[in-house]
Amino acid sequence: MQYVSTRKGLKANAVDTVFQGLAPDGGLYVPESVSAKEALPPLATLGAAEEYVLAELFGDFPASVRSEAVARLLSRFPSPEPVPIVEADGMHILELFHGRTGAFKDVALSMLPVFMRHAAKGRRVLILTATSGDTGSAAMQGFAGVEGTEVAVFFPNVGTSEIQRLQMTTPSDANVHAIAIKGNFDDAQAAVKRIFADEALNAEAAEKGVALSSANSINTGRLVPQIGYYMLAASRLGAFDVVVPSGNFGNLLAAYYAKRLGAPIGKFICASNVNDVLARFVKTGVYDPGDKFTVTNSPSMDIRKSSNVERLLWLLNDGDCSEVARLMDDLAKKGRYELNARAKARLFAEFEGGVATPEETEEEMRRMKSASGYILDPHTAVATHVARALGHPRNGRRLVVAATATPYKFPETCQRAFGEDVLVDPPPSFRDLKTLPVVQNKVVEVAGIDAAVRELADVRG
C-alpha cells in the first residue's frame, strides 16, 4: 500500500508513515487508494476484523508483525467480546472502552507499539503526544516498558477529569512522562506539530540517536487499527448510520475509511460539545475555529483545531494536494477556510452534525438511564443527544453509537447528572487509582514544551 502526504503528495510506505508520524511537508499521510471488494468477508471477531484491515492497509508490515499486533491487542482486552455491541433505547452502542484506560484509544494504542518497534529498526524513538485527556494515558499504558521508546504526553493543566489526570500522573515506568501545560489541547497539539517540522530540533535529537514520532491520530498507526471495529460492526449488523463524539476527528474518519473498504455505512454524524467547530464544518463546509474555547464536562472533545479533518479534505478533493495546501494555507493566514462547491456537495451528502451543551449532556445521561438503564459517559451522551435531535435512528436503518469512554472516567459528572453514585463496580484498573502516588508532576508554560522535549532527548539519547 502506497501512502502520500496531503499537501505535496510525498510518497511513503506504511512502515515509514508509522515511524515518521507527521509527513515532512507538514501534512498527514493517507492511503493513496482504498477500494472495497465486491463482498465484505465474514468478520466474526475483532481479531478477524483487525487482521483484514491490516492486510488491506498495512501490507508493508510482515504478516508476523500484523499478527503480533492483533495478539497484543486481544491480550490487553481479556474479555471474549473486546468491543461488545449493546442495544439500548433503539440504538446499537459499540462499547470501545473496555481497555486498560477506559477509552477507545486503547484499541489502537495496544497495537501501535508493535508497529513502531518494527518501523524503528533498532533506533530510539521519542514519542510526543498532545492529549485532551484520553490519548495520553492510553499512550503511556501502551508504550510502558517498551524497549527503545520514550513517551512524552502534554496535557492541559486545567480541564481533564480527576481520573484522566491520575491515569497520566501515577504511572511510574521510566520511559513514560506526563507533562502538564498552562494551556489547552490546541496549544499542545500546535507545539507538537511545530516540533515535528523543526529541522534544527530534529537534528539535535538525531545527533543523540533519537528520532521523534507521534502517538496521536496524526499517525497512521493510530488511525488504521480504529477502522477494524467499524468493519466488525458492519459484519454483525449490516447497513447502519454512525454517530461519533468527535474531537480530533480521527475516530469518525476511521468509520469513513471503513465505508471505503466496503462497510455499508450511510450517514456519518459528527457530534460536538459547545466547542462546535466540527459540527459547524460538516453543516456549512466552512472550517472556522474562532477564538472561543470552553472547558466542558466532555473534556476529550474540548478541541478547536482537529488534525484529521485534513485527511478528509484530501478525500473530498479526489487527492488534489494543491487544493488541500490552499485550504491549510488559508487556515494559517486567515484563521479559516471554505471548501469548494464540489467538496461541499460531497461533504453534505454523507455527513451531518450537531451540538450538545453541558446541560443537555447531563440531561441525556439521565434520560438514557431512565429509558433503558444504560449509563453513558458524557462524551457518548453528546453523541446520543445529537443523533436523537437529528431524528436518528431513521428510515429503518440501524444507528451505531461509538461509545468512546467508560463513565468511570467521569465520576464527578455522573454524580452531578444522577444525584447519586451510580458507579458501583469500577474496573480493576480504576479501583485503586486514587491511592497510587502521583509521580508525574511537571508543569510547563506552552513556550516551555520545546525545552522539555530537548531535555528528554538529551537525557535518554
Image (cartoon, helix red, strand yellow):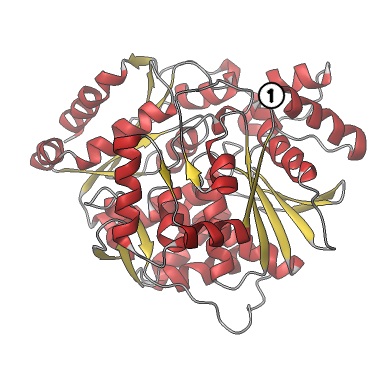
Please name the residue shown 66% across and 53% down the image.
82
Q: With 335 as the anchor, is 412 left or right in this view?
A: right
Q: Residue furthest front?
A: 341
Give the residue at mark 1: 358
Residue 291: x, y in percent? 45, 24
Residue 433: x, y in percent? 59, 22
* Residue situated in front as seen by the camera: 364 or 338: 338
Q: Is residue 348 above or below residue 297?
A: below
Please name the residue shown 29% across and 36% down the image.
333
Q: With 338 as the anchor, is 416 left or right in this view?
A: right
* Residue situated in front as seen by the camera: 123 or 409: 409
Residue 449: x, y in percent? 27, 24
Tally of marks: 1
Quadrant in which residue 98 is drawn: top right
Please name the residue shown 56% across and 33% down the image.
301
Residue 99: x, y in percent? 60, 43
* Residue situated in front as seen by the camera: 124 or 269: 269
Quadrant in which residue 454 is drawn: top left
Q: Is residue 417 visible?
A: yes
Tell me the quadrant of the picture where the N terminus can be found.
bottom left
Could you tell me which secondary element the residue under label 1 belongs to?
helix
Q: Residue furthest bottom?
A: 38
Tell me the quadrant of the picture where the C terminus can be found.
top left
Q: Residue furthest right?
A: 371
Q: Amino acid at mark 1?
A: Pro
